[in-house]
Amino acid sequence: MAILLSFDIDGTLELGDPPGGVTTEMVRKARDVGFIIGSCSDKPLSVQRKIWEDMELTPAFVSAKHQLGKVRRENPADAYYHMGDRDTDYMAAKDNNFGFWWAHEAAEQPWLEFDMNNHEQIPITT
Amino acid sequence: MARPIVPVPDPATQPFWDACNEGKLIVQYCSVCDRRQFPPEAACRDCGFNFHLTWQETSGRAKIVGYSITYDSRLVQWHPLQPFLNVIVALEEDPVINFHTNLIDDFGTNLSEEPDIPIGATCEVQFVEAEPGRMIPEWKLVK
Amino acid sequence: MARPIVPVPDPATQPFWDACNEGKLIIQYCSVCDRRQFPPEAVCRDCGFNFHLTWQETSGRAKIVGYSITYDSRLVQWHPLQPFLNVIVALEEDPVINFHTNLIDDFGTNLSEEPEIPIGATCEVQFVEAEPGRMIPEWKLA
Amino acid sequence: MAREVNWERNHDPVGIWNGRGKAALVARGHSPTDRRWDGESLDKSLGAFMMIAVQNALDDAGITIDDVDGIIGSAGGQGNGQPLSDVWGPRPYFDAPYDSEDGLTHVTGQWLRQQMGFKNLRYINNHGDPVWNLIGQASQAIADGRAEVVVVTYPNGNLPGRYHQDPSNQARGPAVWPNTWGWGLSGQGFTFNQYCQKYGTNHDRMAPFVVQERKNGLLWEHSYYAQHEPGEFTEEDYLNGRMIARDLSIFDCDRPVLAAAAYVMVSADRAKDMKQKPVYILDHTESQFSPRSLVQTIDDTEEWTDIQAQRSYNGSGLKPEDIDIFAPYDGFAVFTQYYIEAFGWRGVKRGEAHDFYAGDISLKGPNPLNSGGGNMGTGRMRTVFITDPLEQLQGRAGDRQVTTKAEVAVTHGVLPITAGTVVMSTSPD
Amino acid sequence: MAREVNWERNHDPVGIWNGRGKAALIARGHSPTDRRWDGESLDKSLGAFMMIAVQNALDDAGITIDDVDGIIGSAGGQPGGAPLSDVWGPRPYFDPPYDSEDGLTHVTGQWLRQQMGFKNIKYINNHGDPIWNLIGQAAQAIADGRAETVVVTYPNGNLPGRYHQDPTNEARGPAVWPNTWGWGLSGQGFTFNQYCQKYGTNHDRMAPFVVQERKNGLLWEHSYYAQHEPGEFTEEDYLNGRMIARDLSIFDCDRPVLAAAAYIMTTAEKAKDMKQTPVYIWDHTESLFSPRSLVQTIDDTEEWTDIQAQRSYNGSGITADDIDVFAPYDGFAVFTQYYIEAWGWRGVKRGEAHDFYAGDISLKGPNPLNSGGGNMGTGRMRTVFITDPLEQLQNRAGERQITGRAEIAVSHGVLPVRAATVVRSTTPG
């Protein structure tokens, strides 16, 4: 089963400004476990790509924050999650039927609790 | 329909809001300067005195002169309604005088990427309840 | 002794009047400008901010710098006390700072045609009750 | 026609005015002068008097309303158009055009436009300060090309009753400081007391000055005293004056009156077509200060008046010996010494004004101080400070015409703390 | 040393400035640029950054603190010295000197004097407006002889959290009008919407301008983007910008940052002894308007910017053709077109700015608009509008040095409703 995790950057990732609680290591682990990973942020796409380079990871997607819908259309998956630190992250997730974690919740790596083989268990909305 | 933010009248604006509650749109008028004024001020901005400043009822008719759409407001109370439409209308009898409105016909509806806002179209004032006992003016298109 | 007119404190002057009630004469002091200020204002008149504006207790000692006598005031409440003495005193440690006073020793006494007001004389602040619970500063000769 | 701001020349160094000689004062018009309004006679209201004065000024200039393209005034005669006296409200108003304060205690340019039928106005400002500032403002507007023919209006009201009486037994805001200790005019009394201490003089030495002003004032037809109290005022009168606040007696305080005056000011170009000789404005400067602490001291007073005198000299390029006609404000009489000494007119230095008063300050002598009589000689009209220098320089002051040269005049007022100075000359250069 | 007022040149006709060429901008100093303060590191506070910037400016000029006799700044970066960002209180303050807002969200000249040990200061003013006005104010103070060597300080703070968020559900005072109908940035969106209607253009046509500013900004070492986000910004990025208030996307709004800058300005005389080539101030002019009714329309905007552009041309005596380096403010990006068209730079007329953007506005081309990158390219620092033209005219802009002539520069900001313009030249004129 395919689950997509969309990371906001500023206030969410440790490489963001301000730094958030989600470390590069956590992102790498999510990739290794098999999540589809990428970023949705107010940062320019080119800057988002540069940040993934700095993390030495290849994202499945980079996107402007308000274009989560496009991410869904272009990346088929069984479940979609976004995480971020702003109202705008929460609203973007809600409008596009993504699950959502606040940045401080995301730092607990809730996705590691998922049973990847039993998608009935995986909540889609917050 | 309750509104996210309600206006609190002060001495200068009380007559304006009172008139809204009575279904009238009024603006200030200085008879010696022959000049309308909105928003309300303590004195006529031209002669600088309040001697000849009265309240004048308007037709309430106005034309759309432009718009914006808010996606990410600094006004937290408005966040649940985002995106929402912001329209400026100019008074038919005196286009210098302009007002904010949300165009109540479209208010709160989902705004397409390219909304069709009829610039120049005539609107009529309507009064909507911002909270119990507090009416505010909004405009809707004249069909 | 009740006074004809009593002061009503406002936010800017409340600390001054509160201190009077505690028997202290305080004025504003801006530490970055090293400057005293009276009457109280929202900001230091020099730097223009309140960041470094504090209240500073004064010695209460002041010198008489001049006077007037009122015979026909526009303040109706003062009419029964006419003529009455008006004195200006300047703070001993900072003569730029000046205050009104009526010189309480002489207050309300019959003023002769040529009163003997000792210009330059040192006075001490005293607090008198303008109305119950409201003390105001007055000066008397040391 | 939003109202103009920042026209003042109040930022040192002002430099020689670039409008020098571009504007000229040509004519004046006065209403009758009454002690007060009776609250009934609308033909003697402040508005009615203002219209009389405007018409007289236009007639004096030989022009009509249609020639005028600007009105500059202080609707109430004080700073920012506020009234000199109390307002009429909450008493009921009258039928239009007397249905507001406008016409009763204020007169705006817009009201005058409606009542008198001005058609060609392109500039109105009702928010001027006292009359010195208005002349400065009008000359600046003309020099800047905002208008070519300006009527300057100065309405000066006085209602029934003693004004400025305060019955309250509580003091709030800034009034907390003076009122709690019973200070009123005593503030000016104190400053004068410091002056007397500093220079070893006293109140009675002002007698020759006030007596002379009363003499001069009786020769001015618009003076309240000339019209209503023409008797001689003697040194004995002065010395027996009832004290109001030591050392200000009733004869050191100007008497509030009801009067209006208007002036016609035009561009140097247009001045040639007018009936009267042009008197050119060489400079105007303005100032605004605040005391170092609570009460205005003699140090404050001397510093402020020095700054303003120097500003005026810098702005006009003149020296004290260039001043033929000198009209320093006197309402209160104790102001005048500060101004004479600051401007150093006739070589008078700090502390010497009372000695100067003891010399020859007569109208026909070498030092005709306030040849119009000032407020002490005319009532609280203030306009004599403009009209008399104008008439002296035009050579039409009649009985008041000085015998000295009358080519350059300096007029200055109102308070040490906020003032305007105007320099006029028979020549534009 | 009470604070000076009325120094502005905002009264038409301003005339050629009589201080022209008397004051020279010599040197600049910048602090690091951070996104925000962490609320803890006092060595990265606004006060600490301001001191770094002042020392860098002094070093750049080759002078010491003892050479300085004036400090002119806006303590908080906005008009009247108010802060750009929120204030720290009511959170608890720190030990001195961080025991008040001074040093955290404001930096006054008095605080700097205490912390840095200035000994010879005779003039301080903390109540300036944004940076354009400060340069004008310093030039005026020097021309007027109030000080000879002035440090101009521009502290620009940003605290943790999103600022200007307003959680209330009641609107009071002037906020009644926008907030009741949910207007925030949409006001600028509306004016831009009118511009697009009037001239048949649209938001996406601004892309070449913003992309070029980002390019230029990356070449300025003090830019937030150069220091913290050095990636390329493409047209694709711009066109996909998240809308904040139509038609302002996140890339049309400047990013708030924490940074301080200082400038050394001195008399033409003293300029000869300094380490850098003097750049002379030819003119400064200022303006303040208000909308005819509630909302600023495109008509208001064009009228105001026309008046101010004309004022600047009248004050400096230059024409559009004389401007080599043009730095019109851009924070919001939609402002810039109004200014370019008002000044008619490179012949651009009303409605033509977006066509102009579509041409060659590259740094090394014939029309190097905002060669420093503006706020879009540097963050909401505002100081690039002073530093880049200075460096261009001193021929030390390095990679940003334009290829054309760089002898006369015009910098203009901040809002259409309230602005100042500074004209600089390599010669005293």
Image (tube, coloured by chain):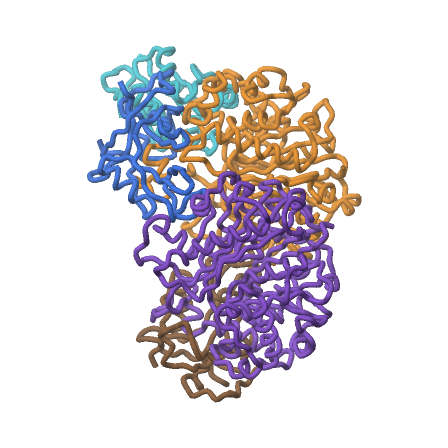
Chain colours: A cyan, B blue, C brown, D purple, E orange
Position of A76 with respect to D384 (left or right) is: left
Q: Is residue B48 above or below residue B80?
A: below
Based on the displayed image, in which of its 4 quarters is residue A12 positioned? Answer: top left
Instruction: Tell me what residue is drawn at x 52 percent, y 20 percent.
Output: E206
Based on the displayed image, in which of its 4 quarters is residue E213 positioned? Answer: top right
Position of E190 with respect to E139 (left or right) is: left
Q: Nearer the viewer, residue C118 or C20?
A: C118
Query: Measured from the top left, where is residue C19 in percent x and y?
Result: 40, 70
Q: How many labels does the image show?
A: 0
Q: Nearer the viewer, residue C45 or D401?
A: D401
Q: Do we see residue A20 in this rendering?
A: no
Based on the displayed image, in which of its 4 quarters is residue E349 positioned? Answer: top right
Instruction: Tell me what residue is drawn at x 51 percent, y 42 percent.
Output: E157
Q: Is residue E231 above or below residue C48?
A: above
Query: Measured from the top left, where is residue D239 in percent x and y?
Result: 55, 83
Q: Do we see residue D156 in this rendering?
A: yes
Instruction: Tell me what residue is drawn at x 50 percent, y 66 percent.
Output: C38
Instruction: Tell me what residue is drawn at x 40 percent, y 29 percent.
Output: B95
Q: Which of D160 and E60 is in front in this view?
A: D160
Query: Measured from the top left, where is residue E138 in percent x and y?
Result: 65, 46
Query: Measured from the top left, where is residue A43 in percent x and y?
Result: 47, 24
